Amino acid sequence: MHNCPLCHSEVAEIFHRDKRREYFRCPECALIFADPEALLAPSDEKAVYDQHENNPADEGYRRFLNRLAAPLMARIGDEPLQGLDFGCGPGPTLSVMLEEAGHNMAVYDPYFADQPEVLEQQYDFVTCTEAIEHFYTPAKEWGLLLGMLKPGGWLGLMTKLARDADAFAQWHYKSDPTHVSFFSRETFQYLADRDGLDVEFVGNDVILLRKTQ
């Protein structure tokens, strides 16, 4: 028996098992999560991230991030706003793109930009690209993200969305040992309904949520 790391409901049955670990699916919020016993130690997790070579000069990486940046900027308008890129990684790039568009950006990453003071402020928008699937304690991080949003603020996420059991069994995304929390449309709809958010799905992996209160 496990408790869902997002909504804390009890989860009894294994959803999937592969050579690396077991996975569980919450019956309440639909989050799929890796066996907590299989989570990497922080030093091993960081060693994986150290292999990433993302940087603002990489036009391909910019095009990838623009799948979130473009629809987000279309919704927040041209007026300079205060934003935070949460989980920016070793080569912050989305924050640079948004600064180039006129916004004031802060960055945070537990390994590469550990500046806890930026987490104590509120922002007009927060972005989190290819990071939410790494959350070991998603209830904690989700609460942190929402708490940093001003009323009416936007949360822009990028993560691959889980589907049904057959698709999950063949899914390359779960092969990354640092990917431990797998969200679906159902999960984000649950969170939106519970937490007073409007939610939009843009393409296959971009989720825009607006704090309505």
Image (cartoon, rainbow, N blue to C red):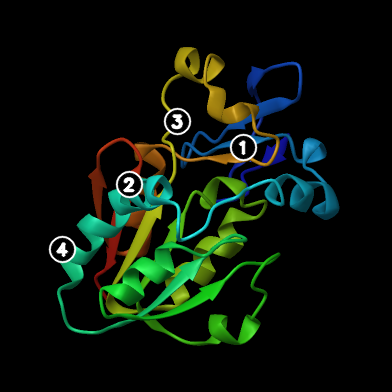
Q: Marks 4 and 2, how far apart in space?
A: 14 Å
What residue sits right under mark 1 in the picture?
A: 33
Instruction: Looking at the image, tell me whether mark 3 or mark 1 is earlier in sequence order.
Output: 1
Q: Marks 4 and 3, how far apart in space?
A: 26 Å
| Callout 1 secondary element | strand
Q: Marks 4 and 1, how far apart in space?
A: 33 Å
Q: Nearer the viewer, residue 50 or 21?
A: 50
Q: Are marks 4 and 3 in contact (CB under 8 Å)?
A: no
Q: Nearer the viewer, residue 115 or 200?
A: 115
Are there few (<14), some (14-19), or many (20+) residues within 10 Å of tag 2?
many
Q: Which percent across, then down, holds residue 108?
A: 57, 72
- Give the vertical position of 95 relative to 81 (above or below): above
Instruction: Looking at the image, tell me whether mark 1 or mark 2 is earlier in sequence order.
Output: 1
* Quarter containing the N terminus: top right
Q: Marks 3 and 1, how far apart in space?
A: 11 Å
Q: Nearer the viewer, residue 104 or 124?
A: 104
Q: Which percent across, then down, holds residue 160?
A: 43, 37
Q: What's the residue type where badge 2 is placed?
A: Val
Q: What's the residue type where badge 4 is placed?
A: Ala
Q: What's the residue type where badge 3 is placed?
A: Ala
* Quarter containing the C terminus: bottom left
Residue 162, numbered label: 3
Q: Quadrant of residue 71?
A: bottom left
Residue 74, numbered label: 4
Q: Which percent across, then down, holds residue 64?
A: 37, 46
